[in-house]
Structure formats: C-alpha cells, structure tokens
Image: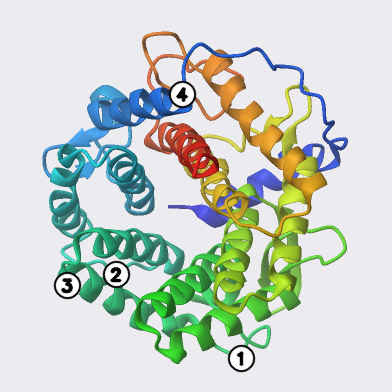
Amino acid sequence: MMKSMYIGLLVLSLFSLNSCSKINDEYQFNDELDISWDQMAQQTSDELITQFWNNEGYFNYGSDGSDLGFQYWPNAHAMDVVIDAYLRTQDPKYKDYFAKWFEGVKKKNGNTYENVFYDDMEWNALTMLRLFEITKEQKYMDAVLHLWNDILKAWNTEYAGGGLAWRKDMLYSKNACSNGPASILAARLYKLTKDEQYLDWAIRIYDWQKETLFDRATGAVYDNINGETDVINMTALTYNQGTFVGTAVELFDITKDPLYMNDAQKASNYTMTKCIDASNNVLRNEGDGDGALFKGIFVRYFIEYLKRDGINEAFRSKFENFIRNNGKVAWQQGQDTGILLFSPSWTQKPLGQTQLTSQSSAAMLFEGLASFEKSTKK
C-alpha cells in the first residue's frame, strides 16, 4: 500500500475541513428510525460477509467479486466486524470464519503474518488477540506474541527520541498509526497476562506519542514526525484520533488515572469539531482505499470511551448525540435501501460496487452503536 503517498495527497484536501466550525448540540438529521441499531448492524455485517468473503479464507477488496485483490490490514478490520457480530449475537455461524480467516490471511500474505508495515501487523495482532479471548485457542496468542516481538524492533531512539517506526525500511518515520495501535495492544496484553513489561511498553509508547504528536491545547493527533528533519506532519486523521482515544481508555482502565480520560475527551472533541462534514455533522469522507477505513476505526475506540464512567456530563451528551447522528445519517443517506452497501461518505450512496474498507467502516459504526445501546441498558 502506498500509504505515505495517500497521506500526502490528503493534506491539501483536508486543510479546509480542518477549519470546520464547531459542532452544534442540535443536529440537522434527527428523524427517528423505524429500525434498531441491532438490526442495522445485523444487516450490514451480514452483507459484508456475503459480498466480500472469499472461500480461500480472506475478504476480497471489492464487493460482489468486483476486486478479488487481497489487502492485509483491511482484512483485520473486516474480521473485527465478524467478531463484533459474534459477540452481539453469540451465533456460532460467525465463529466458523475465525480459523478459516486465520489460515487464509497467512497464506495470502506469503505464508507469514509479518509485513513491512508495522501498523499492519499491529492491526492483525489486535484482531488475533480478540480471537484468543473468545476461543482461548493458543494458536492465536502465539501469533500475537510472534508479531509483538517483531513490532518491538520498530522502537528506536535514534530518530525523534523514541517511538515506533511506521515501516521496516523507513525507521526515521514515526507515525501515529504505528504507535497508537501498538500501545493498545500492549495494554491489552497486560490485562490478559499481568506481565508488567506490557504495561511498561503501553505507557512508554503513549507518553512518547503524547509528547511528540499530540496537541494538548486542541486535542489534535498529528500524523507523523520525520526523524531525520524533525518536521511534523500536522494532518489529523480520524483513525489516529481514535487509537489515541483507545489507548487512553485502556490505560485509564488499568491505572484509574483521570488524566487519561481528559486526554480522551480532548482528542474526541477535536475529532467532532474538526474532522467532520459540517453540513451534516458526521465524520468526514477521507477518501476511498485506506482512507475509507479511518472513521470506522475512530468509532470503534470512541464507543469504548463512551462506555466508561467519568466523562463530563456536558461532553457525554454531546458525544452520544454526535455518534447517534452519524448512524442515522449513514443509514438514511449513505446506502440504497435493499442493497446495504456503503461508500466512503456516509452522506452519499455508493455508485455501483464498493470497497472492503468503506463497507467495514459502516459495519463498525452500526456494530458500535448496537454495542453501546446494549451497554446503556445494563
């Protein structure tokens, strides 16, 4: 994947979006729906499987066989949707995909789980850790630990004083996308094993990112720093905002330090005020390809944040209204009734086929809303 080229092309297109006005407490699209979040999640996630699953054990890149290509990191997020559906329903039909995907992805990735992109390995390790938590099958944990040991090679102090490199042949490029997911992974490994080395790494990575790529005044999470020049790319993308929020939540769970929740609040509020389509008050379109996954990733970790106690009540109301509005707009404007395919924009219907990345993002939105609704009824 040409991620660096993609990020570069986004800078100009997102500049004007970054100056969007603050979100209002009143939303323009508040019509009540005649369908539940659970039903939306069920239909959208099932459509993802129907349209994209390849019997060789991975998800195609295009819907309905339009692109049989394989992309490593989107496959992790598509499997996360299947995991979400299983956790929501406990239907064993979803478990049938676990082992097939685990073997299929390895085969399609050159008979290895390793990759030149450290962040891609982190995403797959996070998914495999979820599979281990559900199944308790050691093969998943073995793969996670194999990837973790490879990921740690990305840490170096030669450039930018620390941080995890983005890819193996660019150790000077320290990116939010390679540090946020790694810190989440380390924190979750600590929760499972109680091995202090994982907590040490989770905090070390988080502290470096907060010091280097986080704007404490605004809540923006900058994309990367070039360790050769110390130039920071100040583009703020929704998935980097999301993984910073996700790490803060994980570390709050472990330490109960309210400073982490304060960080999560700042990053969340920035996303809602600067990373949106202001005309509809929904997360903006960040392009097709890789970019179509970004806002779905934000939603995943933002929902986890909303499930925690300790959120300022004024912000909680605003945040909950915002994410529900995203779901309403996406369902009513972003798909053709009966087709259930979604484009990279949650305010526009797809033209013909769609990509795995945009469909996975929409499924994460509805699975997240269904999960959040369930949590509020406990």
Q: Residue beneath label 3, please?
A: 138
User: CB atoms at circles 2 and 3 under 8 Å apart?
Assistant: no
Is the residue 307 above or below the residue 333 in the image? below
Q: Residues within 10 Å of mark 2 (few under 14, many from 20)?
A: some
Relative to 234, is 331 above or below? above
Give the structural element (helix, strand or loop) at label 2.
loop
Q: Position of residue 223 (x, y in %)?
A: 66, 60
Which tag, 4 or 2, sits closer to the chain's start?
Answer: 2
Going by the numbered disc 1, the residue's amino acid type is Glu
Residue at the disc numbered 2: 114
Question: Which residue lies most toward the front here?
Answer: 378
Q: Amino acid at mark 4?
A: Phe
Q: Is residue 168 visible?
A: no
Q: Nearer the viewer, mark 4 or mark 1?
A: 4
Q: Residue at the location (36% across, 78% down)?
A: 148
Q: Tell me which corner region of the image, top left, top right, bottom left or bottom right, holds residue 149.
A: bottom left
| Callout 1: SS | loop
Residue 235 bears which disc, if any? none
Local secondary structure at mark 3: helix
In-image side of 343 versus 78 (left or right) = right
In the image, which disc is placed on residue 342?
4
Q: Earlier in the sequence, mark 4 or mark 1?
A: 1
Distance, label 2 to label 3, CA atoms, is 18 Å
Identify the amino acid type marked 2: Glu
Say what amino acid the circle numbered 3 marks. Answer: Gln
Quickly name the residue at label 1. 158
